Amino acid sequence: SSRLQERLRYTLGLLLLLQGTDSFYVPGVAPINFHRNDLVEIKAVKLTSSRTQLPYEYYSLPFCRPTKITYKAENLGEVLRGDRIVNTPFQVSMNVEKKCEVLCNVPNKAVTLTVEKSKLIAERIREDYYVHLIADNLPVATRLEFYSSREEEEKKKEKDVQFEHGYRLGFMDGNKFYLHNHLSFILYYHREDVEESQEPTYRVVRFEVIPQSIKLEDLKADEKSMCTLPEATSSAPQEIDPSKENQLLFTYSVHWEESDIKWASRWDTYLTMSDVQIHWFSIINSVVVVFFLSGILSMIIIRTLRKDIANYNKEDDIEDTMEESGWKLVHGDVFRPPQYPMILSSLLGSGIQLFCMILIVIFVAMLGMLSPSSRGALMTTACFLFMFMGVFGGFFAGRLYRTLKGHRWKKGAFCTATLYPGVVFGICFVLNCFIWGKHSSGAVPFPTMVALLCMWFGISLPLVYLGYYFGFRKQPYDNPVRTNQIPRQIPEQRWYMNKFVGILMAGILPFGAMFIELFFIFSAIWENQFYYLFGFLFLVFIILVVSCSQISIVMVYFQLCAEDYRWWWRTFLVSGGSAFYVLIYAVFYFVNKLDIVEFIPSLLYFGYTALMVLSFWLLTGTIGFYAAYMFVRKIYAAVKID
């Protein structure tokens, strides 16, 4: 009975714990309550542009600086993304309006920009840079209103509202550059329910900005560092002439509004993509295609296989006189180890590592634990998970290497731990040198690089060795048929059995199942959008796994029927065929959707795309390989071989 009491106590404890966690908000941080007049800190994150793909830190431009600049300590993901979160001199207090106030050189001295700084600002305006600020961890957004052109609603003038992340640094008119030097902040608060005797508390639920360009002469600033905004019609914008010194004032105003939005759903405005229907359509489309194909494939394959196996197992005298044909013929060679077994098993090990990482990341993100409100969490989680999944990668690689009659397990383990990560690190290092040259905040700082190397050699490498050791010691996969001493001759193959044709044929199905989701992922990476539809992504991932497995089984069946038993490498290459289509899609996206013109941004785009394509090829190739290997072992176990 004491054990029962222990159990009850334990269960009660768990329940209490769960009860307590109800009040926490899983994504991000706990809410901050403000009283009236409390300081709401406004911080700057970075400057970004989808034309150059190079983020810069906020004070790389001559904005007003506070007396002391402090940078927030950042996690790995934020550093890799190029965020450099820093304080700004904006003084914003909860629920306190400000009509117009001068930001620096108080009370009313104009800021003088040297020719160099003016040139730099003009350059950034030409490159279409956006400034990203945050208040209470909420990113700033610019409201864009479109009048929808529906006939019957002309009277009401329905407005479609969309939000742009950050605000534009400035704009161009002809060959002239204008800087947004006045910011009108509009902050929305939600009043929390408190008892009557207490002071009311507020939470920030939205942060918008209306940037304006107003000429120095029109901003009439007085001795109290207050200024008056001119009428919208009469004011001239603040021009920045890159060929001479410019004088201007940086000013801002603050307006508060009450809002019904609860704190927990304050991110919804940033995440409402208007295309959820497209997602559903694409998912249903993919599911239908995949089920239709899997139905056809399984019918064909199962019927043909049944027939084959029944024929092969008939013990008739006629059999001896008839010539054997089809896949049974190659039974003595089908498990003959391929060339370069160490490299094959290493690549498959990395594929398993990637597969586990992606599966867990998407699953955790789908549960809402990696929402965009915790910046950089997704990147950090992915990095650490990849390191820790080395155990599984090593285990599968070791076991396969043993099955393929490999002996040098230490070298194999080293190869598994360094081949794919080494390529990734190499490409990233080269790209990083170019970003360093541009003085962008997107460059990974040297200490972070050393830390990543330490993680790779201190966590990932030992774990891969550990997994490899156990995988290599384990019983190898049992192959149902013996391998002959002498390899048999492979008949001449038809043109459509060519490797490249196979890659083209096998890639279409998995790519077709996921290419709409790919579009959203690309725009999240390259156009500074938020990506958050991880539920859809999880479904797409499962569809991808199913379609890769099916295609690879069909391809290996046709190959064995053509009496070609060299299927190990080929299955791995052919199953990864959809990566080839991803590459073509990336080129198409670059040409049609992005207006990148300079050399370094193009290099970055194609460098990172190459990494994505390589990782995707490893992932799909691994899925296909294991599906085909299981299939081959099953069918040869079903025939009687003398």
Image (tube, rainbow, N blue to C red):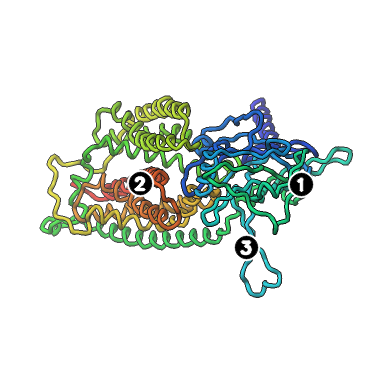
Q: CA distance from mark 3 to mark 1?
A: 27 Å
- Residue 525 in the image: above or below residue 495: above
Q: Taking 259 as reference, is 290 left or right?
A: left
Is there a contact, CB below 8 Å, between mark 1 and mark 2?
no
In the image, 142 versus 303, the foreground residue is: 142
Amino acid, disc 3: Phe
Task: Residue 99: give its label.
Answer: 1
- Residue 102 in the image: above or below residue 10: below
Q: Is residue 312 visible?
A: no
Residue with the mark numbered 3: 146
Residue with the mark numbered 2: 617
Q: Nearer the viewer, mark 1 or mark 2?
A: 1
Q: Residue furthest left?
A: 321
Q: Residues within 10 Å of mark 3 (few under 14, many from 20)?
A: few
Q: Residue at x 70, y 72 (%)?
A: 155
Q: Residues within 10 Å of mark 2 (few under 14, many from 20)?
A: many
